């Protein structure tokens, strides 16, 4: 991939896609093809093919997806499995038909079994049952990985898959359907501004997640697009996890909120722990740079200025 390559970032307005665009532009890649969901419905195969015929992308970051946290996944399972299978199938098949030179497919850490040895190696995939709250989404994401591997085997394509830990950062989704970091940032900000005496955290606070700052993931995706062409999906994490209770305590401090943290155990915990083994990408020479406090502070300040401040 060189600075004049035609690069299509599918899902460029989302959390991960927008971070990849920022990194590509900063690195001098000028020929980016960007189409929003409103301009191009990737669940529609005809429209997807017409778009590829016209634009002929050479490299493709597949960051378009129907995403959400535990509440959204549990509430809209059909949307999550249908839309993600359609988007991936249309893009991967059309990329083969129109000769995309290399495609990077974004998977998700929720594809791994609910109970599996931690840190989780890529080989753990399909060795146990998946956390029920996000099983439809996980099945769709596994299908995307298998599509890439099968097209590589049968047609000699160069489609790689990346499995990121829980991603957070600027330009995330802060409504109830989002992930935990965004959800708690909004809760602590509002509690501080409105003078509430407590913030409610879903579940027991005991689950552990590996929180990866989105600019680190974007950096890893560009690194892998240039340096990795294996058929195995590759984990991207930062090697440390944090309990939801500790996450809440860090955000309480950042928000300077003086009230109490209450745990609503009527809400699901999801996977007890999700810490990836990122040994493969580390061996290739990549490491995440942003620790949890720094990443949360950047995201909280961005939220105040760009969302709450509006
Ligand atoms: O990030 P999250 O929604 O999804 O929840 P998962 C992580 C943990 O944070 C769960 C707890 O134990 C939640 O109960 N939590 C506490 C909260 N307070 C909140 C809150 O205010 N909002 C949210 N959202 N959670 C996701 C999958 O699982 O993992 C996605 O649902 C994706 O599809 C992602 O795969 C990587 O981390 O449990």
Image: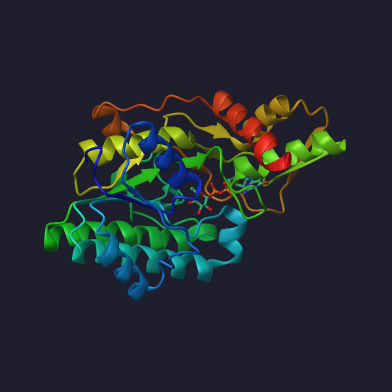
Q: Position of residue 162 (x, y in %)?
A: 33, 45
Image coordinates of residue 161 in percent, x first then y, are 29, 49
Q: Is residue 223 above or below residue 201?
A: above
Of 169 and 305, the residue lying toward us: 305
The outermost residue toward the bottom is: 46
x and y percentages locating residue 133 in the rendered image: 55, 59
The type of colouring in the image is: rainbow
Give the image quarter of residue 165: top left
Identify the residue at horizontal 61%, vertical 39% (top origin).
206
Position of the C terminus, as image quadrant, is top right
- Is residue 277 something that shows in the picture? no
Quarter of the image for residue 221 reads top left
**Residue 109 location in percent, x, y?**
42, 47
Q: Residue at x 42, y 56 (%)?
A: 64
Q: Is residue 187 visible?
A: yes
Question: Is 199 placed left or right of 135 in the picture?
Answer: right
Side of 253 where 197 appears, left or right: right
Give the total of numbered labels: 0
Q: Identify whether 47 is placed above or below 17.
A: below
Q: Residue at (42%, 64%) from the top-left corner? A: 84
Classify residue 10 as left or right of residue 175.
left
In this picture, is 51 found above or below 234?
A: below
The picture quadrant where one finds residue 234 is top left
Residue for point 39% across, 41% down:
117
- The one of 39 and 240 positioned closer to us in this rendering: 39
Q: Quadrant of the N terminus?
A: top left
Q: Say which of 213 and 232 sits in front.
A: 213
Q: Is residue 153 left or right of residue 263?
A: left
């Amino acid at each position: 991939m060189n600075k004049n390559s035609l690069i299509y970032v599918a899902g460029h307005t989302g959390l991960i896609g927008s971070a990849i665009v920022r990194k590509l532009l900063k690195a001098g890649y000028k020929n980016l093809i960007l189409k929003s969901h409103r301009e191009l419905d990737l669940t529609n195969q005809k429209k997807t093919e017409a778009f590829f015929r016209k634009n002929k992308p050479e490299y493709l970051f597949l960051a378009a997806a129907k995403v959400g946290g535990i509440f959204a996944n549990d509430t809209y399972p059909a949307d999550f499995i249908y839309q993600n299978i359609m988007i991936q199938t249309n893009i991967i098949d059309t990329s083969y038909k129109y000769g995309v030179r290399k495609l990077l497919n974004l998977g998700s850490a929720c594809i791994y079994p609910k109970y599996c040895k931690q840190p989780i190696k890529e080989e753990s995939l399909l060795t146990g049952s998946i956390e029920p709250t996000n099983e439809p989404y996980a099945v769709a994401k596994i299908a995307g990985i298998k599509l890439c591997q099968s097209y590589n085997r049968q047609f000699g394509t160069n489609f790689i898959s990346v499995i990121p830990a829980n991603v957070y950062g600027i330009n995330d989704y802060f409504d109830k359907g989002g992930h935990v970091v965004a959800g708690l940032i909004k809760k602590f900000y509002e509690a501080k501004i409105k003078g509430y005496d407590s913030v409610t955290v879903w579940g027991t606070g005991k689950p552990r997640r590996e929180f990866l700052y989105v600019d680190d993931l974007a950096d890893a995706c560009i690194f892998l697009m240039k340096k990795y062409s294996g058929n195995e999906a590759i984990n991207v994490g930062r090697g440390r996890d944090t309990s939801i209770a500790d996450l809440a305590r860090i955000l309480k401090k950042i928000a300077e909120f003086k009230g109490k943290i209450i745990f609503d155990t009527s809400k699901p915990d999801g996977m007890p722990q999700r810490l990836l083994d990122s040994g493969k990408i580390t061996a290739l020479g990549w490491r995440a740079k942003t620790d949890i406090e720094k990443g949360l502070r950047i995201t909280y300040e961005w939220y105040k200025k760009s969302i709450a401040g509006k």
